[in-house]
Image (cartoon, rainbow, N blue to C red):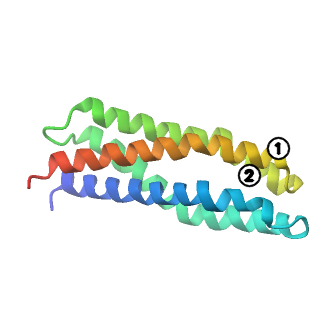
């Protein structure tokens, strides 16, 4: 397997893993925070943060490294603008995570459940949900264009 095919495959794999995860989080997981119960919420949210990091961090790191790798080893026949759009979407997801989601998770883990903070977490997570979905479509298109039938 060539390094380009490996990069494309790993990038598509990590991106689609995050697409599935982010939709699950957006539609099922985050909305259910309000049902945890006040007495156990702090324990729940702290465990959630630790465990979620172990699931999402490897995919996010793999996606970022392979996206950068694709810029340096551009697949033949794929417009550079598509690869740069992919990098921008990775950046949007990382920035949204760092600036919007992590602070809201930290606030919930510090002070307990807050309807206002929870609503903001769910609302701002749509940024990542949309960006990863677009990125998934973009990478699927790139891979389908790259691999001959």
Q: Quadrant of residue 34?
A: bottom right
Residue at position x 9%, y 52% from top?
148
Near-viewer residue (50 or 149):
149
Residue at position x 48%, y 53% from top?
60
> Which image quarter holds the C terminus?
bottom left
Q: Quadrant of residue 26?
A: bottom right
Instruction: Identify the mark nearer the N-term, 1 or 2.
Output: 2
Whole-number angstrom distance, CA of label 1 to CA of label 2 = 12 Å
The residue under label 2 is 105
Mark 1 crowdedness (10 Å alpha carbons): few <14, some 14-19, many ≥20: few
Mark 2 crowdedness (10 Å alpha carbons): few <14, some 14-19, many ≥20: some
Residue at position x 64%, y 68% from top?
51
Indicate the secondary structure of the residue bearing disc 2. Answer: helix
Viewer-nearest of labels 1 and 2? 1
- The disc placed on residue 133 is none
Near-viewer residue (22 or 71):
22
Residue 86 x %, y %: 37, 39
Residue 11 x %, y %: 33, 53
The residue under label 1 is 116
């Amino acid at each position: 397997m060539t390094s380009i095919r490996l990069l494309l495959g790993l990038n598509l794999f990590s991106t689609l893993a995050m697409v599935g995860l982010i939709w699950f989080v957006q539609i099922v997981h985050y909305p259910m925070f309000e049902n945890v119960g006040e007495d156990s919420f702090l324990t729940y949210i702290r465990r959630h943060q630790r465990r979620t990091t172990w699931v999402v961090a490897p995919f996010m790191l793999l996606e970022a490294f392979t996206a950068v790798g694709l810029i340096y080893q551009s697949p033949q026949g794929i417009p550079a603008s598509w690869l740069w759009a992919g990098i921008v979407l990775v950046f949007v997801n990382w920035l949204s995570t760092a600036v919007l989601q992590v602070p809201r998770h930290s606030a919930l883990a510090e002070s307990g459940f807050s309807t206002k903070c929870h609503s903001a977490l769910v609302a701002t997570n749509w940024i990542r949900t949309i960006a990863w979905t677009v990125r998934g479509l973009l990478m699927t298109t790139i891979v389908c264009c790259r691999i001959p039938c």
